[in-house]
Amino acid sequence: PATGHKYELVPGVDATCETTGLTEGKECSVCGAVLKEQQVIPALGHTVITIPGKEATDWEDGYTESQVCGVCGKVFVESEVIPALGFTGLANEPDENGQWPYYTKSVVDTSVTTIAQNDNGWWYVKNGYVDFSAEGVFQNQNGWWYVYGGRVQFGYTGIQKNENGWWRIVNGKVDFTANGVFQNSSGWWYVVNGKVDFTYTGIGYNTNGAWWIVDGKVD
Protein backbone atom coordinates (compact mmCIF):
# COMPACT_ATOMS: atom_id res chain seq x y z
CA PRO A 1 0.00 0.00 0.00
CA ALA A 2 1.01 3.61 -0.52
CA THR A 3 2.90 5.04 2.39
CA GLY A 4 1.72 8.65 1.86
CA HIS A 5 3.79 11.75 1.69
CA LYS A 6 6.03 13.00 4.46
CA TYR A 7 5.93 16.76 4.21
CA GLU A 8 8.55 19.03 5.65
CA LEU A 9 9.11 22.77 5.60
CA VAL A 10 11.40 24.32 3.04
CA PRO A 11 12.89 27.40 4.72
CA GLY A 12 12.35 30.72 3.10
CA VAL A 13 15.10 33.14 2.10
CA ASP A 14 14.95 36.78 3.06
CA ALA A 15 15.14 39.28 0.27
CA THR A 16 17.93 41.84 0.47
CA CYS A 17 18.37 45.26 -1.03
CA GLU A 18 19.76 43.77 -4.25
CA THR A 19 18.69 40.10 -4.32
CA THR A 20 15.31 38.39 -4.36
CA GLY A 21 14.15 36.05 -1.61
CA LEU A 22 11.75 33.10 -1.32
CA THR A 23 8.76 32.41 0.89
CA GLU A 24 8.58 29.28 3.04
CA GLY A 25 7.44 26.12 1.19
CA LYS A 26 6.43 22.50 1.87
CA GLU A 27 7.45 19.34 0.03
CA CYS A 28 7.58 15.59 0.53
CA SER A 29 10.87 14.47 1.93
CA VAL A 30 10.46 11.11 0.22
CA CYS A 31 9.34 11.86 -3.32
CA GLY A 32 9.75 15.63 -3.52
CA ALA A 33 6.13 16.36 -4.23
CA VAL A 34 5.37 20.05 -3.57
CA LEU A 35 2.51 20.86 -1.24
CA LYS A 36 3.25 24.58 -1.01
CA GLU A 37 5.28 26.32 -3.66
CA GLN A 38 7.83 28.92 -2.68
CA GLN A 39 7.09 32.39 -3.99
CA VAL A 40 9.69 34.89 -5.10
CA ILE A 41 10.06 37.93 -2.85
CA PRO A 42 11.25 40.94 -4.86
CA ALA A 43 14.50 42.62 -3.90
CA LEU A 44 13.80 45.36 -1.41
CA GLY A 45 15.83 48.08 -3.08
CA HIS A 46 18.19 50.39 -1.26
CA THR A 47 17.14 52.99 1.28
CA VAL A 48 19.60 55.78 0.59
CA ILE A 49 20.32 58.19 3.41
CA THR A 50 22.50 61.27 3.39
CA ILE A 51 25.10 61.77 6.10
CA PRO A 52 25.84 65.47 6.47
CA GLY A 53 29.37 66.72 6.00
CA LYS A 54 31.36 68.79 8.47
CA GLU A 55 33.26 71.97 7.72
CA ALA A 56 36.97 72.02 8.38
CA THR A 57 38.19 74.36 11.12
CA ASP A 58 41.57 75.93 11.73
CA TRP A 59 42.60 72.93 13.81
CA GLU A 60 40.43 69.97 12.71
CA ASP A 61 39.79 68.23 9.40
CA GLY A 62 36.28 68.26 7.99
CA TYR A 63 34.57 65.88 5.57
CA THR A 64 32.15 66.09 2.68
CA GLU A 65 28.57 64.80 2.62
CA SER A 66 28.15 61.09 1.91
CA GLN A 67 25.29 58.79 0.86
CA VAL A 68 24.83 55.20 2.03
CA CYS A 69 22.09 52.60 2.23
CA GLY A 70 20.56 52.70 5.67
CA VAL A 71 19.80 48.96 5.50
CA CYS A 72 22.84 47.22 4.05
CA GLY A 73 25.41 49.98 4.35
CA LYS A 74 26.38 50.11 0.68
CA VAL A 75 28.18 53.38 -0.08
CA PHE A 76 26.92 55.42 -3.02
CA VAL A 77 28.82 58.65 -2.40
CA GLU A 78 31.98 58.41 -0.35
CA SER A 79 32.88 61.08 2.17
CA GLU A 80 36.13 62.91 1.46
CA VAL A 81 38.40 64.57 3.99
CA ILE A 82 38.60 68.34 3.94
CA PRO A 83 41.99 69.29 5.39
CA ALA A 84 42.11 71.61 8.37
CA LEU A 85 42.45 75.24 7.30
CA GLY A 86 45.43 75.86 9.54
CA PHE A 87 45.42 78.65 12.13
CA THR A 88 47.66 81.64 11.53
CA GLY A 89 47.94 84.15 14.33
CA LEU A 90 48.60 84.55 18.02
CA ALA A 91 47.16 81.98 20.40
CA ASN A 92 44.44 83.06 22.81
CA GLU A 93 45.71 80.85 25.61
CA PRO A 94 49.11 79.59 26.74
CA ASP A 95 50.60 76.30 25.65
CA GLU A 96 51.61 73.50 28.03
CA ASN A 97 54.78 75.44 28.90
CA GLY A 98 52.91 78.60 29.80
CA GLN A 99 54.05 80.42 26.66
CA TRP A 100 51.86 82.22 24.12
CA PRO A 101 52.89 81.01 20.65
CA TYR A 102 52.38 82.53 17.23
CA TYR A 103 51.18 79.98 14.66
CA THR A 104 51.46 79.77 10.89
CA LYS A 105 49.03 77.15 9.62
CA SER A 106 48.78 75.67 13.13
CA VAL A 107 52.54 75.28 13.52
CA VAL A 108 54.54 77.47 15.92
CA ASP A 109 56.47 79.88 13.70
CA THR A 110 59.73 80.86 15.40
CA SER A 111 60.65 83.04 12.42
CA VAL A 112 58.03 85.62 13.44
CA THR A 113 58.95 88.76 15.33
CA THR A 114 56.19 91.37 15.27
CA ILE A 115 53.29 92.99 17.10
CA ALA A 116 50.32 90.58 16.95
CA GLN A 117 46.78 90.67 18.24
CA ASN A 118 44.71 88.09 20.10
CA ASP A 119 41.52 88.28 22.16
CA ASN A 120 43.49 89.64 25.11
CA GLY A 121 45.24 92.56 23.43
CA TRP A 122 48.18 93.42 21.17
CA TRP A 123 51.49 91.79 22.06
CA TYR A 124 55.16 91.87 21.13
CA VAL A 125 56.09 88.50 19.64
CA LYS A 126 59.77 87.56 19.45
CA ASN A 127 60.89 84.39 17.69
CA GLY A 128 57.38 82.99 17.71
CA TYR A 129 56.38 83.67 21.33
CA VAL A 130 55.05 86.62 23.32
CA ASP A 131 57.96 88.31 25.10
CA PHE A 132 56.48 89.53 28.38
CA SER A 133 59.77 91.22 29.27
CA ALA A 134 59.63 93.49 26.24
CA GLU A 135 59.57 97.24 26.84
CA GLY A 136 60.07 99.87 24.19
CA VAL A 137 58.90 100.85 20.73
CA PHE A 138 58.36 98.01 18.27
CA GLN A 139 57.01 97.66 14.75
CA ASN A 140 54.42 95.70 12.82
CA GLN A 141 52.81 96.28 9.43
CA ASN A 142 50.47 98.87 10.93
CA GLY A 143 53.09 101.12 12.52
CA TRP A 144 55.31 101.51 15.57
CA TRP A 145 53.91 100.82 19.04
CA TYR A 146 54.85 101.41 22.65
CA VAL A 147 55.10 98.10 24.51
CA TYR A 148 55.39 97.51 28.24
CA GLY A 149 55.36 94.03 29.79
CA GLY A 150 55.04 92.63 26.29
CA ARG A 151 51.74 94.41 25.66
CA VAL A 152 50.90 97.45 23.55
CA GLN A 153 49.92 100.29 25.89
CA PHE A 154 47.05 101.98 24.08
CA GLY A 155 46.44 104.20 27.10
CA TYR A 156 49.91 105.75 26.94
CA THR A 157 50.78 109.14 25.46
CA GLY A 158 54.30 110.51 25.88
CA ILE A 159 57.90 110.00 24.69
CA GLN A 160 59.55 106.55 24.51
CA LYS A 161 62.69 105.19 22.90
CA ASN A 162 64.07 102.29 20.91
CA GLU A 163 67.38 101.64 19.14
CA ASN A 164 66.37 104.05 16.38
CA GLY A 165 65.67 107.05 18.59
CA TRP A 166 63.12 108.66 20.90
CA TRP A 167 59.55 108.90 19.66
CA ARG A 168 56.31 110.77 20.29
CA ILE A 169 53.65 108.23 21.30
CA VAL A 170 49.91 108.97 21.13
CA ASN A 171 47.54 106.31 22.43
CA GLY A 172 50.25 103.69 22.23
CA LYS A 173 51.37 104.43 18.66
CA VAL A 174 54.18 106.53 17.23
CA ASP A 175 52.70 109.71 15.75
CA PHE A 176 54.92 110.56 12.79
CA THR A 177 52.91 113.75 12.23
CA ALA A 178 53.91 115.14 15.64
CA ASN A 179 55.96 118.36 15.57
CA GLY A 180 56.65 120.55 18.59
CA VAL A 181 57.57 120.21 22.24
CA PHE A 182 56.25 117.21 24.14
CA GLN A 183 56.74 115.68 27.58
CA ASN A 184 57.71 112.42 29.21
CA SER A 185 58.82 111.59 32.75
CA SER A 186 62.34 112.81 31.99
CA GLY A 187 61.42 116.24 30.65
CA TRP A 188 60.19 118.12 27.61
CA TRP A 189 61.53 117.30 24.16
CA TYR A 190 61.69 118.86 20.72
CA VAL A 191 60.03 116.53 18.21
CA VAL A 192 60.15 116.59 14.41
CA ASN A 193 57.99 114.14 12.45
CA GLY A 194 57.42 112.08 15.56
CA LYS A 195 61.10 111.81 16.55
CA VAL A 196 63.08 113.69 19.18
CA ASP A 197 65.70 115.81 17.40
CA PHE A 198 68.75 115.74 19.67
CA THR A 199 70.68 117.88 17.18
CA TYR A 200 68.38 120.87 17.61
CA THR A 201 69.18 123.88 19.75
CA GLY A 202 66.85 126.85 19.48
CA ILE A 203 63.27 127.84 20.14
CA GLY A 204 60.50 125.23 20.13
CA TYR A 205 56.77 125.69 20.50
CA ASN A 206 53.77 123.89 21.91
CA THR A 207 50.33 124.94 23.15
CA ASN A 208 51.91 126.19 26.38
CA GLY A 209 54.27 128.63 24.71
CA ALA A 210 57.78 129.01 23.30
CA TRP A 211 60.68 127.11 24.86
CA TRP A 212 64.45 127.23 24.75
CA ILE A 213 65.74 123.87 23.49
CA VAL A 214 69.30 122.57 23.96
CA ASP A 215 70.21 119.33 22.19
CA GLY A 216 66.55 118.45 21.76
CA LYS A 217 65.47 119.06 25.34
CA VAL A 218 63.86 122.04 27.04
CA ASP A 219 66.53 123.72 29.13
Image: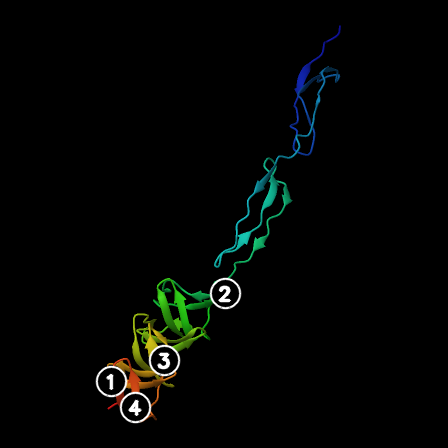
Q: Is residue 48 above or below residue 112?
A: above
Q: CA distance from mark 3 to mark 1?
A: 17 Å
* Residue 43: quarter of image: top right
Q: Mark 2 — residue?
A: 105
Q: Residue at x 59, y 52 (%)?
A: 80
Q: Earlier in the sequence, mark 3 or mark 1?
A: 3
Q: Is residue 118 above or below residue 66?
A: below
From the viewer's perspective, is the residue at label 3 or at label 4 nearer? 4
Q: Position of residue 45 (x, y in %)?
A: 66, 32
Q: What's the amino acid at mark 4?
A: Ile
Q: Find numbered disc 4 in the image and state the secondary structure of the residue it sits on.
A: strand
Q: CA distance from mark 3 to mark 4?
A: 16 Å
Q: Quadrant of the N terminus?
A: top right
Q: Residue at x 26, y 88 (%)?
A: 211
Q: Are marks 3 and 2 in contact (CB under 8 Å)?
A: no
Q: Residue at x 58, y 41 (%)?
A: 50
From the viewer's perspective, is the residue at label 4 or at label 1 nearer? 4
Q: Residue at x 29, y 78 (%)?
A: 158
Q: What's the amino acid at mark 3?
A: Ala
Q: Are marks 1 and 2 in contact (CB under 8 Å)?
A: no
From the viewer's perspective, is the residue at label 3 or at label 2 nearer? 3
Q: Which mark is residue 187?
A: 1
Q: Position of residue 135 (x, y in %)?
A: 32, 78
**Res 135 visible:** no
Q: CA distance from mark 1 to mark 2?
A: 46 Å
